[in-house]
Amino acid sequence: MIKDWSVGAHGWLALHWKRALIFGGGGILALMTLVQIFYPAGNLLPFASIEGVKLSGWSKTDATAALDSRYAQTPLAIYFGDSKEAYRNPKPSEIGTGISNEQRVNQTNYPWYLRIAPGSLLWGHWAVQTASAPSYKHDSAALGVYISKELGDSCSVPAKDAGLKVVDNKLKLQKSTNGGTCTVADVTKKLATAQFNLRGDVRVTIPVKVVPPAVGDSDAQAVADQVSKGISQGINVKAGNQTVLIPKDQLITWLDFSVVEGKLDYSFNVDRAGAYLDTALAAKVAVAPGVTKVSTYDFVETSRQTGPNGQILDKAGTLAGLKSYVTGETKEVTAATVAVAPSTTYVRAYSPTHVGLSALMQHYAETHPGTYGVALTELSGQYRRATYNSDQSFTSASTYKLFVAYSTLLRVEAGSWQWSDQIQGGRSLATCFDDMIVKSDNACGEALLTKIGYAAITNEAHAIGCDDTSFMGKDGIKTTASDLALLLGMVQTGQVLGQQPSRDRLIDAMKRNVYRQGIPKGVSSVVADKVGFMDALLHDAAIVYGPTGPYTLVIMTNGSSWANIAELTRQIEALRIQ
């Protein structure tokens, strides 16, 4: 017969359940007590917390670090007098306060008598929790630095004036706050004794001698009432023979408020109002200005017909009128205007003299973009000389190669250099000289400049009267229109370079110059020239072989164009041959 053990056990439990319960419960209590006895002394009990920070089962070291970190990030709200807003919110370290929770954490020991108490592992945290506060250390020097930085020596807290702000197309009051003066001693005492916690706001209140704001809440509200009433129905503005209503919702967006000399003031912002005023009012008051016609002969004005003024909308004046209406100073608003002077046109005539030619150069330079330096010298016929800004120093760009060419020819004539000499990259002196002038080759120009020497070329230029030319400056090679015209004039007339072949070599190379968009394009005559261009600099130095004889023309510019240089040349040539 097979015995049913499950039925037997069930029957035994039914008969002996009390004994089983006692022995089972006792075993559990014995096991828990054993766990309690050996529970680590360096750990907090399960369910432990300090100031709301849950530290269940944490090691005391970790619990101390966690609490110290929380305290280190807890701000101290500093209030002055009856202020409703904190003036500053420093953290403990900023005011020299060090906070440690080590002692209070260590006080939460699990004593022996609790360890043998039934189930104390579950409820013992209530019995051992500490009411002690953290320990403090104070650095008076750090506190002094903070107070000096934030309050200075006067310990004065400025009052906050009441103001107005536009929010959702409504005026909102920005409430005032009292200021005050206090003593550094009071501030030091309050901050040094401040007690921090993790359960609520931490604050100190510094006693002050109250200083009221210049603009109180009632003052600001009075301004708000005035403005609201003044713009409530919009404002009509007379513009020409029409009236334009500017609605309240538009006007309120233009308002700016500020405290001026202790009073809350307001204005309508020109920038924010500008686009609307341009659309709604500008065309209605605009009057186009006339034209003043001026006739001149050379540098002399011979007649003038003055045109009428025009007018445009004065936005600032119109907005000032809106404010006057709101304040009740005026009963209506008229769009303000400002006069616009007539434009001026010139009818210029020039005499075919040096005075007329100079006047032409000046007027052209004044009415075209860029800076100009111009020099004209006729080498035969009437020998006219005309200039404009001809002594203005310009960076030479490649026109410096004319002075290098002159110094090179001096050395060839003296016999110290031969045309077969090797100069650069396998090129002879003859080839390099030609490439430097015809193609404006930089490698050859720089090689010859280095070979001759900066000082030597400068001195040789000065020796023939080109005193404003220098290769020695820190900001590059400089020259003038007058100096370039002088050099070319002396080459053409034989006043420098004693040998005709030397002069012919230079002039022939200039006639073959490949850059012909400046002076050569402005005349139909043969032109021997050398250009220079670098960044915004455009220069052209030329000998023009005109129908009435040769002349030198140098045009140096900064910020102009080859087309403008060519057009100025054309006008000069047309006046010369009258």
Image: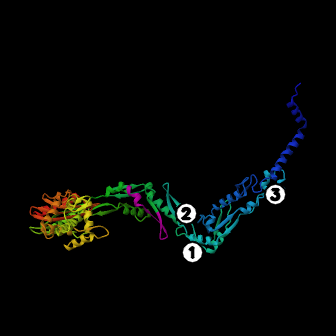
Disc 1 crowd, CA 10 A, few/some/many (<14, 14-19, 20+):
few
The reply to whether residue 187 is in sight is: yes
Q: Is residue 274 magenta?
A: yes
Residues packed near mark 3 inside 10 Å, few (<14), some (14 to 19) or many (20 plus): few
Q: Secondary structure at mark 2?
A: loop
Q: Nearer the viewer, mark 3 or mark 2?
A: 3
- For the residues labelled 2 and 1, say whether their Cβ atoms are less than 8 Å apart: no
The range drawn in magenta is 257-275
Tell me the distance, in whole angstroms, between the alpha carbons under discs 3 and 2: 58 Å
Toward the viewer: 134 or 458?
458
Residue 572, horizontal then vertical, whole percent: 15, 63
Could you tell me residue 28's position as x and y percent? 83, 45
Task: Please state, as top left, top right, bottom left or bottom right, where the N terminus lies in the image.
Answer: top right
Mark 2, residues whose alpha carbon is within 10 Å: few (<14), some, or many (≥20)?
some
Q: Which mark is residue 111?
A: 3
Q: Are marks 3 and 2 in contact (CB under 8 Å)?
A: no
Is residue 254 shown in magenta?
A: no
Of 191 and 136, the residue lying toward us: 136
Choose top left, top right, bottom left or bottom right for residue 459: bottom left
552 and 442: which is toward the camera: 442
Which quadrant of the rendered structure holds the C terminus? Answer: bottom left
Q: Amino acid at mark 2?
A: Lys
Disc 2 and disc 1: Cα gap in Å? 25 Å
Of the two numbered discs 1 and 3 in the rendering, the one whose residue sits closer to the viewer: 3
On residue 175, the disc is 2
The quadrant where residue 315 appears? bottom left
| Left or right of residue 391, residue 263 in this image | right
Q: Is residue 215 left or right of residue 407?
A: right
* Image location of residue 548, percent across then percent down: 9, 63
Residue assigned mark 1: 154
Name the secondary structure under disc 1: loop
Q: Amino acid at mark 1?
A: Ser
